[in-house]
């Protein structure tokens, strides 16, 4: 399997939940609001023998010419966005769901960003996100999922095409889900925002921004031990230095 990180850049985020671009090596974190976190926003593409998988959908920002950044990142890696076959969504916080659809301001309508793909999302996460709303969720950007024909709402744990396993982890958000992709003996694990950075896997870190920080910490420890034993490859959505780590 081929893994391609689709970096959208580094950002700081504080209690307002606004993602402010940050230029590593130039900007000063100390000049940002007290408590600001420095994170990468980094969807992934995994090319398997069966699919072109997109894992989470980024912020949905557009370049100066109006092209969605996630579309441009795919094109820069010689992947036509129309060729994406599956979109796997861990949860719907705006930095993970902003790119699921695009708005045509002239027509006043939203369209699925990957019209030929099947989207997979936990049903209860969708319902919770619609009800909860801002600042963590932006329903206007993902409400289309409830009406689109190419969305499959998952419930509980299960499998997709016998090689992608999804499991409810909760912890970061109530109905957050993780994915394991297995092919030809390779195991790629995506823990979403329960396991967003390599360093957090190696420490007993409890974050105040998680729905259940203690559970996040415990899950990270479990996954790290199992991953080491079974030689997993981990994907880290918010890690600036190490987006992919393999034992």
Image (cartoon, rainbow, N blue to C red):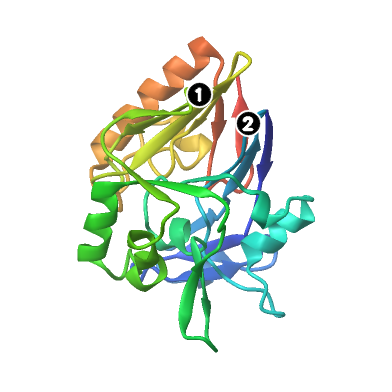
Q: Position of residue 106 (x, y in %)?
A: 55, 89
Note whether 159 is above or below 136 in the view shown. Answer: above
Describe residue 207's horizontal placement relative to residue 62 as left or right. left
Q: Residue at x 70, y 57 (%)?
A: 73
Is 64 located above or below residue 236 in the figure?
A: below
The percent coordinates of residue 50 (x first, y second) are: 63, 31
Residue that mark 2 sits on: 50
Q: From this viewpoint, is residue 245 visible? A: yes
Real-space Cα distance between discs 2 and 1?
A: 10 Å
Is residue 173 among the parts visible in the rendering?
no
Q: Quadrant of residue 90?
A: top left
Task: For mark 1, give the secondary structure.
Answer: loop
The residue where tag 1 is placed is 163
Q: Check the image and name the residue furthest to the bottom.
A: 106
Whether residue 107 is situated above or below residue 220 in the rendered picture: below
Q: Residues within 10 Å of mark 1 (few under 14, many from 20)?
A: few
Q: Position of residue 158 (x, y in %)?
A: 34, 28
Q: Mark 2 or 1, which is nearer the eye?
A: 2
Could you tell me residue 78's position as x and y percent? 79, 51
For the N terminus, give its image quadrant: top right
* Mark count: 2
Residue lying farthest top? 229
Residues at circles 2 and 1 in contact by the CB criterion of under 8 Å: yes
In which image quadrant can residue 40 be found?
Answer: bottom right
**Disc nearer the start of the sequence (2/1):** 2
Report which quarter residue 81 is drawn in: bottom right
Residue at screen point 51% across, 12% down: 230
Residue 90 against residue 57 in the figure, above or below: above
What residue is at 66 percent from the left and 78 percent from the top? 66
């Amino acid at each position: 399997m081929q893994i391609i990180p689709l970096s959208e850049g580094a950002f700081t985020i504080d209690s307002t939940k606004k993602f402010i671009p940050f230029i590593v090596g130039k900007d000063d974190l100390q000049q940002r609001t007290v408590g600001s976190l420095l994170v990468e926003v980094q969807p992934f593409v995994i090319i398997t023998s069966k699919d072109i998988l997109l894992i989470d959908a980024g912020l949905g920002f557009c370049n100066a010419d109006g092209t969605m950044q996630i579309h441009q990142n795919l094109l820069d890696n010689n992947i036509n966005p129309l060729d994406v076959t599956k979109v796997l969504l861990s949860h719907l916080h705006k930095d993970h769901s902003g790119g699921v659809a695009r708005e045509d301001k002239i027509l006043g309508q939203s369209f699925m960003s990957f019209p030929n793909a099947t989207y997979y999302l936990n049903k209860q996460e969708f319902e919770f996100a619609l009800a909860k709303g801002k600042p963590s969720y932006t329903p206007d950007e993902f409400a289309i999922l409830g009406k689109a024909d190419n969305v499959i709402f998952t419930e509980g744990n299960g499998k997709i095409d016998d090689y992608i396993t999804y499991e409810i982890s909760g912890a970061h958000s109530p109905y957050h889900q993780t994915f394991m992709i297995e092919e030809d003996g390779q195991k790629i694990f995506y823990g979403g925002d329960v396991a967003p950075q390599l360093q957090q896997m190696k420490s007993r870190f409890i974050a105040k921004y998680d729905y259940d920080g203690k559970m996040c910490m415990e899950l990270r420890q479990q996954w790290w031990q199992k991953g080491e034993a079974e030689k997993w490859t981990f994907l880290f959505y918010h890690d600036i230095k190490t987006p992919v780590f393999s034992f």
